[in-house]
């Protein structure tokens, strides 16, 4: 039983029912005319009940060879053949029952059970439907049809027949359990919970475990984590060797958020595999239970020293508990014993966080060397260079990255930022436009493109305009792409002076504003375009809307202040300029706070470049 997924492992009780039902001997439903067939039936039945299926089958075959053609005898033959594993003979026997007694549910039911046992649920459902048509209130037909439909994932339809089976035998555990299961799978957990509340946990251990496990899944689906934890705990108490139940218990208890619950978790089952320890550790880490996760990762490594997932997650857990030095040392030992790009990449991130910048870039470089086809490692190395303002190496990494991974938009973003940082704005705009072409819906690509908008010379937009036009045309409902095309076109045309044609740019920007009214950038851009067309009041309205949407942006305050001066509204102009200056000061302070000392990083890298 696998309860790591909330719906997994719930069909096994159905299988148990089918396996049991097929061997359950049925007394003859039809009177036999001859004494020998009657005697043969009684003799075979006694042998089958005492576990002598082969002997029972021999008795039945002799009787049939002698001319007996009673449906009850063929039914007993099917049961005996099925117990011996001869499913072909069992199927032939049950089909014979159906031919001899087509208006009785018995043959259809037992054939359906056999087909279900063999995974032929579509055929089984058809057989149970025939049984149901013969006897609409037949419990086995209703239960078999419901469970077969559930196996076919037709849960809503299955629930109807299982409910009817329950109505025939109220309180029947099997019917109630399967009905609740079907309701859960049909995404009706509240109804499933109501059904389970009418059941009692069976006395036999196996069925009780199944009951509590299903009750736990239902409660977990309803986000009643404390209740789910209690059910799983009862199931695990009855079956303390089940890893899946334990995993579900841990998951529900951690989701509950109770410190007492976490502290009272029982120890896991013994003899877990490395993979099971790792999975359990990952579950604990996902809920920030790092201290409990560490022994699981350690055990996984003891069982499998080469387990990279355990190595990395053990280091991450140690770092999360404040043991960064130990985490770095662990990864360094792992890297020394078995070179791995993943180990070096995680090690580099930890070295960066610890302020070991030179070591971090060396580890990122090692990750790239070991796995040159891994796009993530190129990206991480480039980010490391960008973080410490070594823009030349960053540009080179991303230049190679765009060649090796031409469909990775973030490689072009990294390349664009590398150009932008050294004022190569045309190249930056080219890279950011390429990122948009690869991933037009990317917020990061749009933000990067918008960041370079004011820095590109008007003449440099010319080669990009056809590409931006294609993007906006291909995505007519994208406010961002309409903005990109409109803003670039406005700048390109505005530079032409008296010859400027601004109608298309205005149409694009106004379309962008209609598509997304809460878009501050488009209001700022429309404000500038309206100023260029001497539509001052419309420009004021646009700048005020931009300020309302983004009060912390200094640009609309500055532009509105300049416009108020042109309109001779000097008091309003002074207020806007003062607001701009204050916001600009705060912005500059944040930039200074984000800059770290990089001399120890840049100098060694420069020296290394001169002496390769």
Image: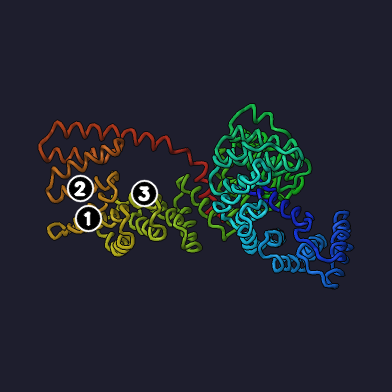
Residue 401 appears left or right of 428:
right
Up-down: is 428 above or below 595? below
The CA span between labels 3 and 1 is: 19 Å
Q: Secondary structure at mark 2?
A: helix
Could you say which disc has been placed on residue 461 in the image?
A: none
Disc 1/disc 2 C-alpha distance (Å): 9 Å
In this rendering, is residue 38 above or below 327?
below
Where residue 211 sits in the image (x, y, percent)?
A: 68, 41
| Label disc, if present, on residue 447 of the rendered structure | 3
Instruction: In this rendered view, identify the residue nearer to me: 110 or 134.
Output: 134
Residue hosting label 1: 490
Q: Position of residue 185 (x, y in %)?
A: 57, 49
- Depth check: give the residue in front, 337 or 478: 478
| Mark 1 residue crowding within 10 angstroms, few (<14) / some (14–19) / many (20+) | many
Q: Could you tell me which residue is drawn at 56 percent across and 50 percent down?
A: 160
Whether pointer 1 and pointer 2 mark residues with C-beta atoms closer than 8 Å, the reply is yes
Instruction: Report the residue marked by disc 2.
Output: 528
* Mark 3: secondary structure: helix
């Amino acid at each position: 039983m696998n309860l790591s997924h909330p719906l997994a492992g719930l069909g096994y009780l159905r299988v148990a029912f089918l396996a049991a039902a097929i061997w359950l001997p049925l007394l003859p439903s039809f009177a036999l005319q001859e004494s020998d067939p009657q005697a043969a039936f009684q003799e075979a039945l006694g042998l089958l009940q005492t576990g002598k299926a082969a002997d029972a089958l021999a008795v039945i075959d002799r009787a049939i060879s002698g001319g007996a053609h009673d449906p009850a005898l063929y039914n007993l033959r099917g049961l005996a053949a099925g117990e011996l594993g001869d499913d072909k003979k069992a199927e032939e026997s049950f089909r014979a029952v159906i031919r001899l007694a087509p208006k009785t549910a018995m043959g259809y039911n037992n054939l359906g059970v056999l087909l279900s046992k063999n995974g032929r649920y579509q055929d089984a459902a058809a057989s149970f439907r025939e049984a149901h048509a013969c006897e609409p209130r037949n419990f086995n037909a209703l239960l078999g049809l419901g469970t077969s439909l559930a196996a076919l994932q037709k849960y809503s339809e299955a629930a109807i027949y299982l409910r009817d089976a329950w109505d025939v035998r109220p309180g029947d555990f099997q019917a109630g359990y399967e009905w609740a299961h079907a309701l859960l799978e049909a995404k009706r957990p509240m109804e499933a919970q109501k059904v389970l509340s009418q059941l009692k946990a069976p006395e036999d251990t196996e069925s009780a475990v199944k009951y509590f496990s299903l009750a736990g899944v239902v409660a977990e689906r309803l986000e009643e984590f404390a209740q789910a934890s209690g059910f799983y705990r009862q199931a695990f108490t009855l079956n303390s060797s089940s890893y899946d139940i334990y995993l579900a218990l841990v998951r529900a208890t951690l989701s509950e958020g109770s410190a007492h619950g976490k502290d009272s978790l029982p120890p896991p089952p013994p003899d877990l595999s490395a993979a099971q320890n790792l999975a359990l550790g990952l579950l604990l880490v996902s809920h920030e239970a790092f201290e409990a996760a560490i022994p699981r990762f350690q055990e996984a490594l003891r069982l499998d020293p080469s387990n990279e997932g355990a190595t990395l997650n053990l280091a991450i857990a140690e770092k999360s508990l404040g043991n960064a030095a130990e985490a770095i040392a662990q990864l360094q030992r792992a890297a020394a014993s078995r070179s791995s790009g993943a180990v070096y990449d995680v090690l580099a991130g930890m070295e960066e966080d610890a302020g070991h910048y030179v070591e971090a870039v060396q580890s990122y470089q090692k990750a790239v060397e070991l796995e040159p086809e891994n796009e993530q490692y190129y990206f991480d190395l480039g980010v490391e260079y960008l973080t410490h303002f070594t823009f030349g190496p960053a540009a080179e990494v991303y230049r190679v990255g765009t060649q090796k991974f031409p469909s990775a938009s973030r490689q072009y973003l990294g390349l664009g930022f590398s150009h932008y940082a050294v004022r190569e704005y045309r190249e930056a705009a080219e890279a950011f436009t390429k990122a948009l072409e690869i991933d037009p819906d990317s917020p990061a690509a749009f933000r990067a493109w918008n960041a370079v908008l004011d820095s590109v010379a008007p003449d440099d937009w010319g080669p990009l305009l056809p590409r931006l036009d294609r993007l906006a045309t291909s995505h007519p409902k994208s406010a961002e792409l309409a903005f990109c095309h409109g803003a670039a076109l406005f700048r390109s045309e505005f530079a032409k002076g008296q010859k400027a044609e601004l109608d298309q740019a205005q149409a694009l920007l106004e379309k962008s504003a209609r598509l997304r009214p809460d878009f501050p950038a488009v209001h700022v851009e429309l404000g500038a375009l309206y100023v260029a067309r001497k539509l001052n009041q419309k420009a004021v309205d646009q700048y005020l809307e931009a300020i309302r949407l983004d009060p912390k942006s200094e640009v609309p305050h500055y532009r509105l202040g300049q416009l108020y001066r042109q309109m001779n509204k000097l008091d309003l102009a002074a207020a806007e300029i003062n607001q701009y200056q204050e916001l600009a000061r705060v912005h500059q302070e944040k930039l200074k706070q984000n800059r770290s000392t990089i001399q120890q990083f840049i100098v060694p890298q420069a020296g290394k470049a001169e002496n390769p």
